[in-house]
Amino acid sequence: MLGLTIREVSAALREGRISPTELCRKCLNRIKRTRHLNAYIAVTEELALKQAGEAEARLLRGAPKGPLDGIPFAVKDNFCTENIKTTCASRMLKDYTPPYTATVVQKLLNQGAILMGKTNMDEFAMGAGSTDGAFGPVRNPWSYAAPYRERTGAAPDSDWVVTGGSSGGSAAAVASLTSYLALGSDTGGSTRNPGALCGVVALKPTYGLLSRHGLIPLVNSMDVPGIMTRSVSDAAIVLGILQGQDTRDSTTTAAPSSLTELPEHFDVKNICVGIPQEYHAPGLSEETLAQWSRVADMFERAGARVKRVSLPHTQHSIVCYHVLCHAEVASNMARFDGLEYGHRSEEDSSTEAMYASSRHEGFNDVVRGRILSGNYFLLKQNSEHYFVKAQRVRRLIAEDFKRAFGSGVDVLLTPTTLADAARYSDFTQEDNRTRSAQEDVFTQPVNMAGLPAVSVPTALSSRGLPIGLQLIGPALQDKKLLGVAQWIEQRVGFPSITGAIKHMQDGSFDSFIIRHCPCEIEMRPVLCFMTC
Amino acid sequence: NATNNNNDNSRSDPQQLVGVVGLEVHAQINSNTKLFSGSSVRFSAPPNSLVSPFDASLPGTLPVLNKRCVEAAVMTALALNCTINKKSLFDRKHYFYADLPAGYQITQQRRPIAVDGTLTYSILGGKKRSQVIRRTSTIKQIQLEQDSGKSLHDDLRSQTLIDLNRAGVGLMELVMEPDMSCGEEAAAAVRELQLILQALGTCQANMSEGQLRVDANVSVHKPGEPLGVRTEVKNINSVRFLSRAIDYEIQRHIQVLQRGGTVQNETRAFDSKSGFMPEPNLPPLIVYEDNASLPTGIDACQAVVVQEIRAGLPELPSIKRDRLVQTYGILPEHSFTLVNEDGLVEYFEAVLKATTKEPRKVIGWVTNELVGHLKQRDMSVSQSPISPSALAELLERQESGHISSSVAKQVFQEMWRSPGKTASQIIQEQDLGLVSDATQLHSICQKVVDSHPVEVHAIRNGNKKVLNKLMGLVQKETKGRADPVLVRAILQEKTS
């Protein structure tokens, strides 16, 4: 039951095969048994059971609110939730309880979806590993699945791999089957990166399509709530519910169409898939490259036009991204002074001393480092050299994409990450700044341009870890993008985790069991490429 | 060295130094809610009772622009002959201060909603200060921005308390070019601006409640040379003090330079380094010229249309003054007094309706007697114990020859002291009616003529002006009740 998609479990609920309360309890149990993953900062058990009871009453009356009624979901801990702590995985907000709920969370609650808890992340979403939060790193559920264990002979306690980040907790929640969907946030790849490394579908919608009201910002001009699910069609369902204008976020736009269900069969014959040559970047693993070629070939064989395109300014993107990101971080973080809310130091010799030590104690090195460099970029004498210049390059990057889409390309196909997930012990050899530059290289140009992109898991690597590919579409073509993504999903036969988990009592680990997605494979047996 | 030479020059010719004054005016927008949040705007509400999550800069909150504030800024800009920028932008201006909860202020410094306007005001000049001299100052720009909260320092317990009620209230900042030369000009300009804002209803413009806050940049220089070092005069809560503070500062600069010193600019040292960044949560602010220029798909009630606002502009103070001068034939300086006092024009016009007295004769009663009495007691026109109709009745009694003008003034004072009593009642009770009994007046006049032979002689020698002195003496005898026309005739007869 836990391994189903939203669509499947929603049907099960309606048909009475399981009740929302039973489902909720199953998820809560699983959360307990996968606590070693550290996916959740807070589990809202009491509230979840109460909501499940209400959903149950509606379903019994035959009046569910919609496809999400009774469906457990998780939310990254940088979305505000009324009366539920929202920490951003920071000491600064360790005890912060917001008085209001983020629009996207509220929309899910209004649909009867059941909030299981708030998920772990890098502090203030600054990171690409989910290793730099105040509550410890998140472990990738695939670290405990049979393929990785068997193929690498890894020792469970020391050789676990990271989830990617910064929405690692959300990715782990969906991948470890404790929630059917999770909200992440995506500023430079923070939803797609852990989505790829944890083997889940991760959608970064067009900037402005989803409200940011209540999302504690990293970079306001790039932040987008991200959607993580186990299938593309689930992502489409959730997108349909979350999208649209919000009077509380002036940067939102009306949805181009009310998105309901994706067509089961998407015809790729008339589409043109662009392969950006600049994404053959140094450090791209052979296996990821092989997946990229494999899917490109699939398109070609199915009659789509696959053409090489150039996005010449992409190479400058990551540097400019960092300048803009740090500048906005410096600005956004200025409010955390310990006065109105958040951590306040004992230091009281002066207001300035209180500010300084509250911020020193409240933020980790990564956050403080970005504030420092961001303020440097914003200094009057530096702004023109750094901030303004980076903004100009940002426009060039956006124009690159526009030109590519203007030349007849419908979607761009790229890798999501350079390689599969790194072992925690390897990942932490490099600092956060270096890791962010490596990990976000394929994902952040999309944020610079505000475009929709989705990461779809395509295969397991030789180490038994997920590899994902990214599709990028023109602004507001999210639905078409998902149509193409589903076409890939139906053909790659990516395995999903089900099965057993760590037993908390004795500390021993059960293996996750891999099951194939039977329906898709049976439907199109010829096109299934299994790598495991 | 160069500095010393400069100082020597200024010392050798200090008379040439003149003041240069530029104003920055922060006008709190008269709106129900704040610039970017739904919190109410109210003066003297309990501390922190008007604070939304956005005002307290809770993380995840976003600004949503208040349309009323934009309309107020556009209306103000139109009244001040500005060019409206069809597209303006919001920036974040960063600085750390306890009453600025976000650590930045959202402002429009770099691309404001309006630029290039003028403020025309008048000062009184000439020997008797009755000559109206028109001046025009240039308004560089008008920008929308957030007000800050308030810090209250409790030195005793070494605590700072923060009240965020004001945080996020909409301000119009008017930046004016340094083209004034003294406190009087600045005060007159601010007074005129106050009247304009009040007429528009875009700002209540009460300085003591902080709805209008004026900072003045002051420097001195010799005409034709670059401006001297600027200092700021801030936190002034009345027009009168503003004038004095500016003049004081100009004199201080001159004295410093005369002594061979240099003027130090001690304010806002941090400002030069503080960074600007576009406010990423607010798209460009677009206003439209007319309904025809609205793009399709834009909800008309979501759009700010300049033409509609222009059509709704009320009568501005300068137009009102011109109208008063033309309609009633009063002097320009009287029109200033009328317009300067809230409700005085209406009072004046109400008196005119109820009396046959000419406006030119009524005006003195209103601008001198009434305003004089009000000012003495720091009262507003609406608090006057004498209603327009009561004053009109008094003036009627005088006009009809029932009482003399000097008695009329006496009656006015009595009416002020005893509200509710009519002029007629007072005249009757105190027997103030005009003495027009010819026999009685003849005998009084004779007594005066007899006791002043020197004056009578002068009159007979052709110095007719001396007659007025005798008239005065007769009025003194009758406590001002004698009919002046009759008295003059009798005296002329007796001195011819």
Image (cartoon, rainbow, N blue to C red):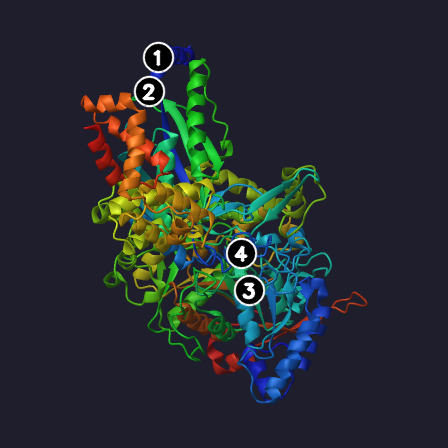
- Residue A198 percent location from the top left of the image: 59, 64
Q: Which disc, if any, is residue A480?
A: none
**Residue that numbered label 3 is attached to:** A102
| In-image side of B325 versus A229 (left or right) | left
User: Hey, what amino acid is under mark 4?
Assistant: Phe
Subunit under mark 3: A
Do circles 1 and 2 both sit on a common chain? yes
User: Hey, what amino acid is under mark 2?
Assistant: Lys
Q: Determine which quarter of the picture holds residue B473.
A: top left
Do circles 1 and 4 both sit on a common chain? yes
CB within 8 Å, label 4 to label 2: no
| In-image side of A89 versus B380 (left or right) | right
CB within 8 Å, label 1 to label 2: yes
**Residue that numbered label 4 is attached to:** B54
- Residue A401 percent location from the top left of the image: 36, 57
- Residue B186 percent location from the top left of the image: 37, 34
